[in-house]
Image (cartoon, grey):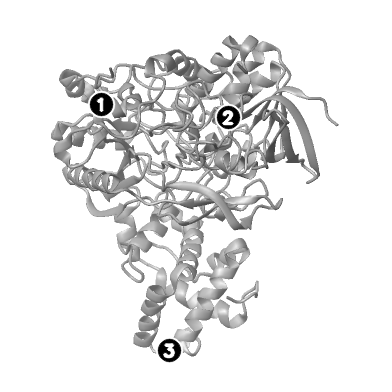
């Protein structure tokens, strides 16, 4: 694994390309793709302890592609991406997770999902208490604990 | 040289806090050494927009992933179930789901009832008052009267059913299967200085609201007010012994990394089922060459985890997702032995309400049900907020080959040998897991779920660390006696989950703490002749 702790311009380009393949933009849902500038900036700013694995994943991706991923024909790019996910192990899984965890906290994405743009605390959430008469059949059936001598 | 303390407790987690609080009334000089520090709720994950991402890093349940200075590494490569824990004041009660079942009376008589493993040297009735006392101090919520669980009297009402609970209840009713609101340590009303739950959802990695009970906010404030001294960021390397074979104190590294010796008249270990055998094995000496308190050879052996067989799917209706505590209901339908099932003993069931969007995306992508590309958005919207889960908590029986030893190479940041885990899932447990998955599938299909996925075992599911210094009356078959005292070292006690004889099929923290209170009570009753 590389000891390098920042991404090269080529790696950044490949990260952007693979991110768009994981989550492309959607007009239907009014969401950006994961290659969006803000999401990419979030990824790069918060790589932290995942940097080594992401660099390893991008090294692996570069080996599979043999050239900048974006320069491949679409069919070849899809093939590389598929191979990357199958053979990339923990490193590839980490890259995908890093992309998804930044994508699914983006304001535009959360808004599209109908989720509030906030941390859970201190607002919390309200739960319906529910209809506890649902328990009546369980109470009616009863039962007993197994006896211990 | 420091003055000796009357009682030295190692570990400030679930059991260490309980025993410290209970012994405080003796007015003895009690000192607790804890390798972690005090937690700051303002820094808990749910206070930030990146709350889900933190669970993959600094708030991972795995000490190996988390890698905080307070953690020690664990070599669990040779185990399909990885150890999870937390090291701080409060220990793993800082990071747990707050699910609060008790072992059943029958769990203490496994040999008599089913002819396997061993009976405990104590029974459920001996623990009953301590269960009750512990529930009051930890602050439990629930609904008394479950016909298939031991009778409890939670001081607070059960959690709301929510959207998920209603779906679960209806499906279980269709099948005619038992379900009941879980006892939990989530405060459903303001309680003893704790604010009621506001459904942050992200309960497991610490509760910013303080509604989830952890011993840093329950037992410890009381114990400290009563005079117990708690020294944080102090990692114990070994327990020392004197010429009479009695524990004489501990060697530890203080917050500055400086080696210290603390003499003590009584030593109590409360380091969990991995940390405790590690410490005993690291305390080997010429008098105790195989490790302290290990004349039986059983220190570290009989490790029990509770393999979790989890199955989940996606229903049409919205579920509670991340907008509620993750657990709210349990089932004891398959708790007791029925040999027609093909295995002995049984399992409890913990239902899961849902997951947050990042977790949903990451896990579903890994499972292959969330595609890359154009269809990603449609599928994600079908999955997110619709998850429902069923986890069978399978009773693991003690087997000596499942064990904790010292790793010959791996060490913690102080150079102390780290624990190594060797563990395999038994054939009996595997059959139990398969049975649980089959019942879970029936449940999910009855609830209308699709895209059903399985985690069996949950790989990072080694929450329950049990059995590695078992209690018993026979010194050749146990490490501590029926009231927690080492057979070999008369002023050494163990109060954590390592003294479990069998594991039951439920989350163990309630029983661990009741045991700690019971042992403290036994000590108080015997103060005049504690070492006889």
Instruction: Tell me if B65 is positioned left or right of B438 in this view.
Output: right
Task: Name the residue beneath numbered marker 3.
Answer: A72
SS category of the residue bearing label 3: loop
Horizontal and vertical percent position of residue A98? 51, 63
Disc 1 versus disc 3: distance between alpha carbons? 67 Å
Task: Answer with mark 2 or mark 1, whichever residue precedes in sequence.
Answer: 1
Question: Residue B492, located in which quarter of the rendered image?
Answer: top right
Q: In what element is the residue under mark 2?
A: loop
* B119 or A21, nearer to the observer: B119
Q: Position of residue B421 (x, y in %)?
A: 49, 51
Q: Is residue B9 visible?
A: yes
Label placed on residue B40: none
Asked whether the residues under the numbered discs 1 and 3 touch, taking CB atoms below 8 Å apart as contact, a structural biologist would say no
Residue A92 percent location from the top left of the image: 46, 71
Task: Please state which of residues B126 and B83 is positioned toward the viewer in this rendering.
Answer: B126
Specify whether residue B51 is in view: no
| Residue A6 horizontal/vertical position (percent) | 65, 73
Q: Residue at x 47, y 19 (%)?
A: B135
Task: Report crowding for label 3: few under 14, some 14 to 19, many 20 or more residues within 10 A (C-alpha).
Answer: some
Q: Residues within 10 Å of mark 2 (few under 14, many from 20)?
A: some
Q: Dot 1: what SS?
A: helix
Task: From the image, tell me which residue sits under label 2.
Answer: B488
The disc placed on residue B113 is 1
């Amino acid at each position: 694994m590389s000891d390098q702790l920042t991404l090269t311009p080529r790696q950044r380009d490949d990260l952007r390309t693979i991110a768009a393949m994981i989550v492309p933009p959607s007009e239907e849902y009014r969401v950006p793709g994961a290659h969006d500038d803000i999401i990419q900036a979030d990824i790069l700013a918060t790589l932290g302890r995942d940097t080594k694995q992401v660099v390893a994943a991008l090294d692996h991706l570069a080996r599979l592609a043999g050239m900048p991923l974006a320069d491949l024909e679409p069919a070849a790019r899809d093939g590389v991406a598929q191979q990357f996910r199958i053979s990339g192990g923990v490193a590839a899984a980490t890259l995908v997770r890093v992309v998804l965890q930044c994508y699914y906290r983006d304001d535009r994405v959360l808004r599209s999902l109908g989720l509030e743009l906030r941390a859970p605390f201190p607002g919390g959430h309200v739960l319906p208490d529910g209809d506890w008469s649902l328990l009546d059949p369980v109470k009616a059936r009863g039962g007993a604990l197994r006896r211990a001598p | 040289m420091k003055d000796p303390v009357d009682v030295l407790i190692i570990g400030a987690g679930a059991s260490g806090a309980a025993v410290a609080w209970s012994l405080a009334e003796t007015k003895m000089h009690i000192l607790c050494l804890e390798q972690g520090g005090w937690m700051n709720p303002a820094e808990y994950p749910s206070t930030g927009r990146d709350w889900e991402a933190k669970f993959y890093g600094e708030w991972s349940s795995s000490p190996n992933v988390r890698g905080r200075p307070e953690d020690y590494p664990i070599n669990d490569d040779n185990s399909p179930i990885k150890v999870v824990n937390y090291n701080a004041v409060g220990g793993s009660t800082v990071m747990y789901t707050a699910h609060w079942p008790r072992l059943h009376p029958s769990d203490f008589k496994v040999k008599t009832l089913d002819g396997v493993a061993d009976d405990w040297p104590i029974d459920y009735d001996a623990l009953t008052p301590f269960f009750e006392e512990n529930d009051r101090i930890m602050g439990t919520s629930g609904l008394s009267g479950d016909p298939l669980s031991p009778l409890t009297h939670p001081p607070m009402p059960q959690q709301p059913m929510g959207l998920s609970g209603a779906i679960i209840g209806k499906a279980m009713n269709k099948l005619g299967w038992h379900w009941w609101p879980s006892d939990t340590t989530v405060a459903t009303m303001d309680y003893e200085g704790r604010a009621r739950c506001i459904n942050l959802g992200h309960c497991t990695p610490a509760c910013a609201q303080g509604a989830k009970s952890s011993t840093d906010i329950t037992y410890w404030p009381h114990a400290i007010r009563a005079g117990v001294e708690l020294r944080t960021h102090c990692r114990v390397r070994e327990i020392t012994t004197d010429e009479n074979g009695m524990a004489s104190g501990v060697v530890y590294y203080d917050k500055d990394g400086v080696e210290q010796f603390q003499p003590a008249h009584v030593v109590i270990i409360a380091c969990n089922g991995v940390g405790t055998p590690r410490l005993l094995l690291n305390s080997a000496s010429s008098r105790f060459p195989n490790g302290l308190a290990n004349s039986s050879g059983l220190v570290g052996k009989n490790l029990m985890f509770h393999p979790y067989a989890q199955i989940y799917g996606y229903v049409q209706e919205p579920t509670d997702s991340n907008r509620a505590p993750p657990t709210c209901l349990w089932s004891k339908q398959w708790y007791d032995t029925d040999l027609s099932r093909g295995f002995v003993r049984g399992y409890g069931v913990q239902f899961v309400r849902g997951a947050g969007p990042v977790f949903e995306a990451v896990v579903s992508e890994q499972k292959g049900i969330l595609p890359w590309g154009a269809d990603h958005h449609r599928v994600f919207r079908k999955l997110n907020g619709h998850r429902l889960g069923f986890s069978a908590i399978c009773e693991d029986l003690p087997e000596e080959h499942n064990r904790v030893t010292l790793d010959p190479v791996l060490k913690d940041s102080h150079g102390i040998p780290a624990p190594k885990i060797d563990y395999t899932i038994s054939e009996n447990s595997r059959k139990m897991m398969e049975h649980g998955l089959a019942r879970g599938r029936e449940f999910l299909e009855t609830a209308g779920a699709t895209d059903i996925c399985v985690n069996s075992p949950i790989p990072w599911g080694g929450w329950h660390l049990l059995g590695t210094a078992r209690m018993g009356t026979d010194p050749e078959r146990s490490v501590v006696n029926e009231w927690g005292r080492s057979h070999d070292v008369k002023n050494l006690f163990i109060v954590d989950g390592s003294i479990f004889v069998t594991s039951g099929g439920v989350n163990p923290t309630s029983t661990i703490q009741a045991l700690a209170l019971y042992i403290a009570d036994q000590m108080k009753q015997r103060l005049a002749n504690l070492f006889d």
